[in-house]
Image: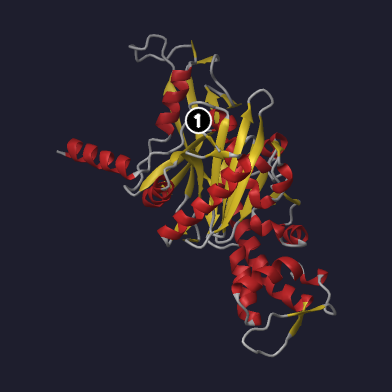
Amino acid sequence: MKNLNLSQDKNIRVGIDVGSDKIVCAIGEVIPQSKEVKLLGIGLAKSTGIKHGSIIHRDKVIEEIEKAIAEAETMADTKVNRAILSISGDHIRGINTQGAIAIQKNRHSTLPVEQDIRKEDVQKVLELAKAISFPVDRDILHVLPQEYVIDTMTGIKNPVGMSGRRLEARVHLVTVATSAASNLTSCAEELGIVVDGLVFQGLASSLSALDKDEKELGVALVDIGGGTTEITVYHEEGIRHTGVIPIGASSITNDIAVMLQIGTEDAEKIKLKYASAKASMASPELDFELPVKNGGISRQVSEHELSRYVEARMVEILQLVAREISRADIREKLTYGIVLTGGGAQLKNLTGLAEEVLKMRVRIGKPKGISGVVEVANSPLYAAALGLLQWSLHQEEMSIMVRSEFSARTLVTRIATWFKDFF
């Protein structure tokens, strides 16, 4: 097995999507010329140490990440020692903000004059835009520029080289609980993995599932995971809103388990095989056998009855999604409507129900821009993991920073610096 070292092969990327239901590790090779990613290997492990995006059992998380990595390493015939991780949970918050600076010809003068805008000016205005007072237990995960304004000219995507007197940046900040980020990072570091960055799970999924036209004319990416549902709203190529709902497809599985009095593993299998998001699309005449354990009585239930439980919970999730989308800072209608991805998007007839509830066009989002062994990952379940592989292709144009400094060592340094400044 080859030893993967990013300093030796800068085009190799590893993404680990850490979810509440599954952990997916993807290894790929970035092709800069075509801006595509060649998938080399992918591994999947059941996630039992995370609930609603938060770690509840650290040892299990480490064990399951290790299992997913080992499976991907075997397929790719290479050794992983660096990776980018996804992060989710209802502790994640998104906020729109802005900052402005005067463009100075003589950098020692305070008088604004007409002058070419440099990269340093863009960096300065972005730093100013994110200079918001947050609680001590929160960190900025992403600074995502929406647009720039030069004097009275709006809608500018790249102001470098243009001239003006005043530069304004409108950005979307994604913030994260420091403890959640550092705990996730430490799990990977326990396995000897260097964490090159953390990426919001909904943002990662959007990189692989959306195209440029959708982001320009308006679309909402809804990633339905096991314990959480992530919403990322795009308009005019900028992210206008991000949010996390602490409910996902696992709640449907639990409903089936309770109503039919069966185990959650059996309920998950039955959901994927027989359930329909729209009960009207399931036949009341098609019955299936329920699993029997410990000498119990044989029982049957119709697909229609099963789907009634599923539809009720799915409608609730979609209504929460609609409420979250309404918080986006846009007045125009989303031209491309909704793109559903994540493991929960595999539910049969989900697009039909979503169009009824949300009153918008809906499609299922599968990973794009991927070559190689794509047949093993051609599912919305893998959108976030493959989006992490594509992150490096979009990072510079989308974000000026990605927090990867959540290790215990960095936190100690921060605390020491704080005490020094305080005294």
Report the residue that reaches farthest toward the left.
423
Figure colour scheme:
secondary structure
Inspect the image, locate mark 1, and give the three-letter code of the amino acid beneath it: Leu
- Along the horizontal axis of the image, is 226 left or right of 379? left
In terms of image quadrants, where is residue 140?
A: top left
- Along the horizontal axis of the image, is 177 left or right of 240? left
| Residue nearest the observer in this picture, 87 or 5 | 5
- On the question of residue 14 being in view, the answer is yes
**Dividing the image into 4 quarters, which one contains the N terminus?**
top right
Instruction: List x then y, in percent, for residue 178.
Output: 37, 48
Q: Is residue 141 above or below residue 101?
A: below
Residue drawn 72% across the image and 59% down it? 354
- Along the horizontal axis of the image, is 2 left or right of 31? left
Report the residue that reaches farthest toward the top.
106
Q: Secondary structure at mark 1?
A: loop
Residue drawn 59% across the image and 43% down it? 26
Residue located beneath label 1 in the image: 6
Report the residue that reaches farthest toward the front.
1
Instruction: List x then y, in percent, for residue 124.
Output: 41, 24
> Crowding near pointer 1: few (<14 within 10 Å), some, many (20+)?
some
Q: Is residue 142 above or below residue 154?
A: below
| Residue nearest the observer in this picture, 114 or 371 | 371
Q: Is residue 43 above or below residue 168?
A: below
- On the question of residue 337 being in view, the answer is no
In terms of image quadrants, where is residue 423?
A: top left
Residue drawn 78% across the image and 76% down it? 304
For the image, the number of numbered tags is: 1
Instruction: List x then y, in percent, for residue 245.
Output: 54, 58
